[in-house]
Amino acid sequence: MGVLYLMKKVVVSLFTVIALLGAIGVADGAAFAEELEHTELTFDSLDLVRDYYTEYASENSWESLGEIMRAQAEAEVISDGAFVASMSRLYTPRVLWVERMAIADYYFRSFEEAEEGFYTDYYVDPAAGAAILVILRDSNPKNLEEENLEFIIRDSTGKVYREDEIKVDATPAEEQTFLGMTWHDAVYRLYVQGDLREVEYLELFILVDTLVARAHHKWELH
């Protein structure tokens, strides 16, 4: 599985969607509802929506489609736990495929090569697992060190994944300073191993050694 790129784009929120539906009218609103149906977060086959994505991107842009897909893939942050802030993104095959096409479009690269690279280096069969991107921010860099963190995932069936069932790829924390305040950002790429095709939701728990508070993220799947 290749490196997952974190593209710094504007996230389309649900509130933006609601506002747009009110602004563009019923007819266009129906089309927008269809768009949401095709871009909802799911482990269903990419082949079912490939033609729709290609047509949408040709009429709008791969960038805008990528923004929508990333917004759908963002977890609901129920609690940041011990951290100043936390976020995570679930990479389903559809999310990853659109991201690879958007990157190819941005750099004027071949879509055919991007497609081949997707299946060679990025594709994860939902029957085998899924990739998750996690970004943590805190003023105490100790709270972001891999040896002080434990990642636990629970699915809608109650199954818990931890330790050897989750592979972790960590990026060293980077220091940021703004208006006299200093914090640290760390990026973690997780790969949870298990059959996720039929789950209705996934939860991610991030525990910090010696601290009671834990971050809690959740994805609803369709």
Image (cartoon, grey):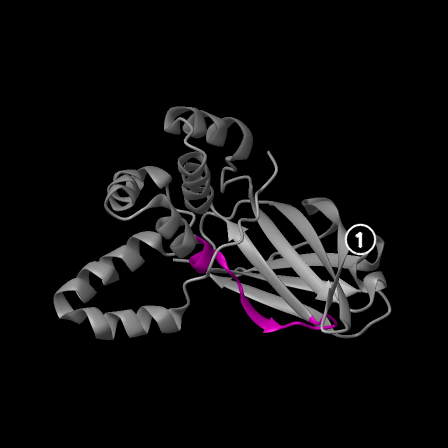
First to last magenta residue range: 70-84
Magenta-colored stretch includes residue 152 = no
Horizontal side of residue 1 vs 105, given as left or right? right
Residue denoted by label 1: 146
Magenta-colored stretch includes residue 73 = yes
Residue in the picture at 26% in, 41% down: 58
Decide: few, some or many residues near mark 1? Use Cα within 10 Å; few <14, some 14-19, many ≥20: some
Quarter of the image for residue 85 reads bottom right
Quarter of the image for residue 109 reads top left
Residue in the picture at 30% in, 52% down: 38
User: Quadrant of the image for the C terminus?
Assistant: bottom left
Which is more toward the observer, 46 or 186?
186
Which is more toward the observer, 151 or 112?
112
For the question of whether residue 187 can be seen, the reply is yes
Horizontal side of residue 86 vs 98, given as left or right? right
Residue in the picture at 68% in, 58% down: 152
The percent coordinates of residue 208 (x first, y second) are 79, 65
User: Quadrant of the image for the N terminus?
Assistant: top right
For the question of whether residue 41 can be seen, the reply is no
Which is more toward the observer, 1 or 184?
184
The percent coordinates of residue 57 (x first, y second) are 30, 44
Residue in the picture at 47% in, 47% down: 92
Number of numbered discs: 1
In the rendered view, tell whether residue 63 sits above or below residue 1.
below
Residue farthest along the left direction in this orientation? 27
The percent coordinates of residue 40 (x first, y second) are 37, 56
